[in-house]
Structures are given as structure tokens and as C-alpha cells.
Amino acid sequence: MTRAISVALLVGGVVLLYFGGQSFHSLSNDVSRFFTGSPTSKTIWLIAGGIVASLAGLIGLALPSKR
């Protein structure tokens, strides 16, 4: 994995986590948590995708380059 792809994954993961956090504190999510006890599926996907992309980017940056 090249450094540019790793950095892009890391930045994209942070952006997804930001939007997931914003979605987690929204009014519609509060209503969903009140009635169902869990956040909306959109919020869960944003946060999970952000975690996966961030971890992939960090691992790609941590691995030594083959060049």
C-alpha cells in the first residue's frame, strides 16, 4: 500500500468519524435512541466505516515501505 493511499484512508476515516459523531448527536438520532434504544443505522455505518478506514490508513503508514 502506498503512502498516499494510506494518508487518504486516514483522512477519509477521520472525516467519516466526524460525520458519524455529528449524526450521533442529531435530533433524529435522539428520537431513534429513545424509541429503539440504539442509534440509527446510518450513524453506525459512518462510525464503523471511519474506524475501519482510519485503522487501515494507520497500518499502511506503520508498515515499512518495500522500496
Image (cartoon, rainbow, N blue to C red):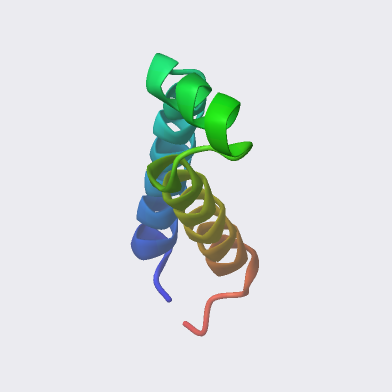
Q: Give the image location of residue 48, x and y in percent.
A: 52, 54
Q: Give the image location of residue 3, x and y in percent.
A: 42, 63
Q: Residue at x 39, y 31 (%)?
A: 19
Q: Residue furthest front?
A: 35
Q: Residue furthest top?
A: 27
| 24 lies above or below 9 | above
Q: Residue at x 51, y 20 (%)?
A: 30
Q: Residue furthest bottom?
A: 66
Q: Residue at x 63, y 36 (%)?
A: 37
Locate residue 44 relative to residue 37 in the image: left or right.
left
Q: Give the image location of residue 39, x and y in percent.
A: 53, 37
| 23 lies above or below 9 | above
Locate residue 48 relative to residue 5 in the image: left or right.
right
The one nearer the camera, 65 or 13, is 13
Q: Residue at x 35, y 59 (%)?
A: 4
The one nearer the camera, 45 or 35, is 35
Locate residue 37 relative to residue 47 in the image: left or right.
right
| 52 lies above or below 47 | below
Q: Quadrant of the N terminus?
A: bottom left
Locate residue 2 relative to residue 56 in the image: left or right.
left
- Which image quadrant is residue 58 in? bottom right
The one nearer the camera, 54 or 34, is 34
Q: Give the image location of residue 11, x and y in percent.
A: 41, 43
The one nearer the camera, 53 or 8, is 53
